[in-house]
Image (cartoon, rainbow, N blue to C red):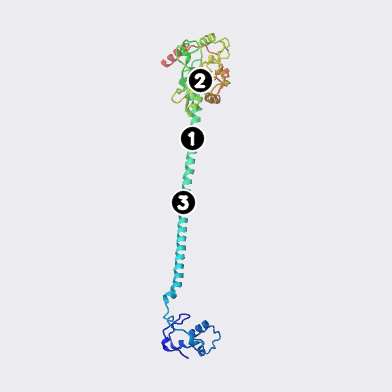
Amino acid sequence: MYLDNKYLGKACPYCRFPIKKETDNVLCSECLIAHHLECWHKNKGCTTYDCKGKLCSTIDFGESNKQPDTGKALLPLYKKACLAVLVTAILIGLSLGYMNLLRQVAVKEAEIEVLNKNLNDLKSDISLLNDETVELENHLTSVSSEDVTADIFELRGLVEVRHVDSNILVNLYYATEENITGEVLYPVEVCLLQRGTAEKLAAANAEFMRDGYRLKIWDGYRPLNVQEALWEKKPDPRYVADPAVGSNHNRGAAVDVTLVDEDGNKLEMPTGFDDFEEEASRDYEGMSKEARENMDYLTEVMIRNGFTPIQSEWWHFNDANVYEYDFIDLTLEEFLEQYFLYNIN
């Protein structure tokens, strides 16, 4: 049987599919292929479609059988589509962000590579500069005496120390009354040494100056008459050599020195000059830590440049080749007189 045409345009109450043709209204077993009949039978529980329409009369095409809301029907698909678009956009954004990050990393790696290259070039330049500096320093400290002292006046092997190195300070206490005799023993402040000894002292001073210090000489060559005056005042061979034996100062191959900074300020040492007591000994346990460090530093550099210390006086250093030189008895006035004549000539 057929339903009334009033149901045309309505929708299947089960699948919400619209009934468009008259043939779609068939609700009997003769038209089993009819879509809506199939839906209805399934809903009612008839699986064989042989109810002969007995159940057909219970179908409800009431208010619920209005035209289907295609918007609502498409809403799940729309949501899925939107979700898919959103996920796709997120994935694209992440991909673009990752690619941008990779580009930034590549740029930074390139910049780092350039910086490393520049750093290596700079290190190479610094190393080359250091090598050149060391070479220059070695050249300056190892220049032969013929190059440095070719025009320096020399008398009996003795030269004025400041003619070899003007950076060495000279403060001869024996040219003042500030010594153990209380008298002026040197009429002039002329500091003489053997040429070889003076050159070694200049080399030591160059090393001190690289560290920010300078040598100050308290005594160098000592005439025999001054040696006799000192022995008369302090006849103790630990501090003053017997004139009958002679002092290495009489050879012009011994120096009494200390250290000052670049401004001429003295460094702390165990004692002052000619302090002929146990405090002047290198083994004195009562000296301050700073004094011992300064004394050791002075000694290390002097030894490295060809001098040897003595135990009783921290300030005294002999030329390591002291016994290659003979004793000399020459007054400072005689040296100056010959020096002036040399300059005039």
Which of the 4 quarters of the picture holds residue 49? bottom right
Amino acid type at circle 3 is Lys
Amino acid type at circle 2 is Val
Residue visible at 47% across and 53% down?
105
Q: Percent from the top left, x then y, of residue 121?
A: 48, 43
Circle 1: element type: helix
Front position in the image: 205 or 92: 92
Mark 1 = which residue?
A: 132
Q: Is residue 211 above or below residue 245?
A: below
Give the spatial CA distance, label 3 vs label 2.
59 Å
Q: Is residue 62 above or below residue 195?
A: below
Label 3 Cα neighbours within 10 Å, binned few <14 / some 14-19 / many ≥20 = few
Q: On the picture, is 36 further left or further right than 283?
A: left
Give the spatial CA distance, label 2 vs label 1.
32 Å
The numbered mark, 2 or 1, whose residue comes first in the sequence reads 1
Q: On the picture, is 72 further left or further right than 271?
A: left
Circle 2: element type: strand
Tell me, yes or no, whether the two marked residues, 1 and 3, touch with CB atoms within 8 Å.
no
Mark 2 = which residue?
A: 257
Front position in the image: 279 or 266: 279
Q: Percent from the top left, x then y, of residue 237?
A: 58, 13
Circle 3: element type: helix
The numbered mark, 3 or 2, whose residue comes first in the sequence reads 3
Q: Is residue 198 above or below residue 31?
A: above
Which numbered disc covers residue 206? none
Residue visible at 49% across and 30% down?
137
